[in-house]
Image: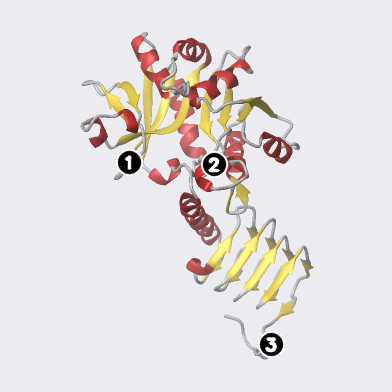
C-alpha cells in the first residue's frame, strides 16, 4: 500500500453561519469540526496532513499550534475546491503516494468509511476513488453520472445539472483518494467556471476519465456521514447525530443512560461501567466519571474527574476532582435514600 497524505479544505468563511469565526472551528459535541476530521486522519496513519486555510486563518493556526504534524497552506481568495487542492498539492510537490482530499466541515465521517475508501483505492489500483452515497433528497449535491457499464463518467454540480440529472440519487460525498501524479496532471488541466474564477475539484474526475485514467467509486449507505455544515441549522443536525452516537457508545460499554433525549455528553468524556446517568445531565470537556456512579438528575459537569461510587445531583461543577464515595444530593432528598 502506498503512503497516504491528506489535504483538508478549511478556508471557508461560513457566510451562512453568520459568524466571524472560521467555519471549521465551529464545535460539534465539544470539539471543532476540523478536530473531528483530523482525528480520523490520525487514525488512518496519514503521513502528512496539509490544512488549506483562508478566512481568519490565524485562529485556525493558533488552535492547531500544538499539532506539529499539521502543515498549512494559505488560500488568499476563495476560488473553489479545485484551486484549494492545487495549493495543497503545491505543498506536497515531492509527494509520490496517495492523497486523500476531505472537507473541513464534515464532522460526522467515520474512520471505518475512509479506511474502506483508501483500502479499495489501493486494492483496485485506481488513479482516483471517490466516496458516494444514495440519498432521498439530493438537493444541493453534485450528481454522480455513470456509463452503461456502471463505471464513473463524471460529477455534475447541482446548479449545472439538467432535469434528468437532478433525478439521480447517487451524490458526490466530497471525499476523494487520488494517486498523486495523475492528480497533479488533472489539476493542471482544470479551467475556471465563472466570473469569480472558481475551479471545481469535481472537474478532475471528468478529466481523468477522458484521459484514460481509472476512476472508481465507493458507496456508503449512511447519508449522515456526508453532511456538510454550512448553516446553524445543519450544525444543530450534526450535533444531534453525533450526540446520539456518543450516547450509544457509552451504553454499549456498560453505562446506563435513563433518558438519552435529555442527556448531553461531549466527545472526550469517559465514563466507567455500571454508572447511571439520570435525566437532564450535561457532561462537557474532559470529564472522567468512575465506575458505579450516579450522576444527575440536573447535573452539569465541566472538566471534572469523579471517583468510583460517587453520587452527584442538582449541581454545577467545573475543574474539580470528586473523590470515591462522594455524595452531593439534592436538598429535598434524605441522605439514606437508595439511588435509582
Q: Where does label 1 land, which residue?
A: 139
Asked whether 185 or 289 is in front, the reply is 185
Asked which secondary structure carries label 1, the reply is loop
Q: Earlier in the sequence, mark 1 or mark 3?
A: 1
Is 219 on the left-hand or right-hand side of 314? left
For the residues bearing labels 1 and 2, Cβ distance under 8 angstroms? no
Q: Earlier in the sequence, mark 2 or mark 3?
A: 2
Q: Residue at x 49, y 41 (%)?
A: 109
Give the percent coordinates (x, y) of residue 16: 49, 45
Residue 3 visible: no
Residue 213 visible: yes
Q: Which of the two discs, 1 and 3, sits closer to the camera? A: 1
Asked whether 327 or 55 is in front, the reply is 55
Give the percent coordinates (x, y) of residue 230: 48, 43
Q: Where does label 2 land, which residue?
A: 14
Q: Which mark is residue 245?
A: none
Q: Residue at x 56, y 73 (%)?
A: 278
Q: Which of the two discs, 1 and 2, sits closer to the camera? A: 2
Q: Which of the two discs, 2 and 3, sits closer to the camera? A: 2
Give the percent coordinates (x, y) of residue 85: 54, 22
Local crowd size for mark 1, using a 10 Å CA cut-off: few (<14), some (14–19), many (≥20): some
Vertical side of 63 occupied by 268: above or below: below
Q: Earlier in the sequence, mark 1 or mark 2?
A: 2
Vertical side of 265 occupied by 17: above or below: above
Give the percent coordinates (x, y) of residue 267: 60, 53
Asked which secondary structure carries label 2, the reply is loop
Q: Residue at x 67, y 91 (%)?
A: 334
Is 126 on the left-hand or right-hand side of 49? left
Q: Quadrant of residue 315?
A: bottom right
Asked whether 274 or 169 is in front, the reply is 169
Q: Where does label 3 land, which residue?
A: 331
Amino acid at each position: 500500500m502506498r503512503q497516504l497524505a491528506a489535504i483538508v479544505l478549511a478556508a471557508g468563511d461560513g457566510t451562512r453561519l453568520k459568524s466571524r469565526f472560521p467555519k471549521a472551528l465551529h464545535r460539534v459535541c465539544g470539539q471543532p469540526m476540523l478536530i473531528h476530521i483530523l482525528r480520523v486522519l490520525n487514525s488512518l496513519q496519514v503521513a502528512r496532513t496539509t490544512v488549506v486555510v483562508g478566512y481568519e486563518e490565524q485562529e485556525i493556526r493558533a488552535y492547531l499550534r500544538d499539532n506539529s504534524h499539521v502543515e498549512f497552506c494559505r488560500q488568499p481568495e476563495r476560488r473553489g475546491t479545485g484551486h484549494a487542492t492545487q495549493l495543497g498539492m503545491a505543498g506536497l510537490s515531492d509527494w509520490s503516494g496517495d492523497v486523500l482530499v476531505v472537507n473541513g466541515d464534515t464532522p460526522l465521517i467515520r474512520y471505518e468509511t475512509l479506511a474502506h475508501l483508501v483500502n479499495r483505492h489501493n486494492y483496485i489500483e485506481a488513479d482516483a476513488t471517490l466516496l458516494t452515497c444514495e440519498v432521498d433528497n439530493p438537493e444541493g449535491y453534485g450528481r454522480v453520472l455513470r456509463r452503461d457499464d456502471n463505471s464513473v463518467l463524471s460529477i455534475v454540480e447541482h446548479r449545472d445539472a439538467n432535469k434528468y440529472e437532478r433525478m439521480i440519487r447517487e451524490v458526490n460525498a466530497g471525499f476523494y483518494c487520488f494517486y498523486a501524479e495523475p492528480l497533479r496532471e488533472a489539476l493542471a488541466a482544470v479551467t475556471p467556471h465563472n466570473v469569480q474564477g472558481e475551479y471545481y475539484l469535481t472537474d478532475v474526475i471528468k478529466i481523468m476519465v477522458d484521459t484514460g485514467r481509472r476512476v472508481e467509486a465507493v458507496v456508503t449507505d449512511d447519508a449522515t456521514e456526508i453532511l456538510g455544515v454550512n448553516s446553524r441549522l445543519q450544525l444543530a443536525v450534526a450535533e444531534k447525530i453525533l450526540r446520539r452516537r456518543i450516547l450509544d457508545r457509552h451504553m454499549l460499554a456498560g453505562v446506563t443512560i435513563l433518558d438519552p433525549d435529555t442527556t448531553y455528553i461531549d466527545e472526550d468524556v469517559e465514563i466507567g461501567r455500571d454508572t447511571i446517568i439520570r435525566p437532564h445531565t450535561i457532561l462537557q470537556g474532559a470529564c472522567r466519571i468512575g465506575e458505579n456512579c450516579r450522576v444527575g438528575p440536573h447535573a452539569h459537569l465541566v472538566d471534572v474527574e469523579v471517583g468510583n461510587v460517587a453520587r452527584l445531583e442538582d449541581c454545577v461543577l467545573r475543574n474539580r476532582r470528586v473523590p470515591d464515595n462522594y455524595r452531593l444530593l439534592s436538598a429535598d432528598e434524605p441522605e439514606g435514600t437508595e439511588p435509582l
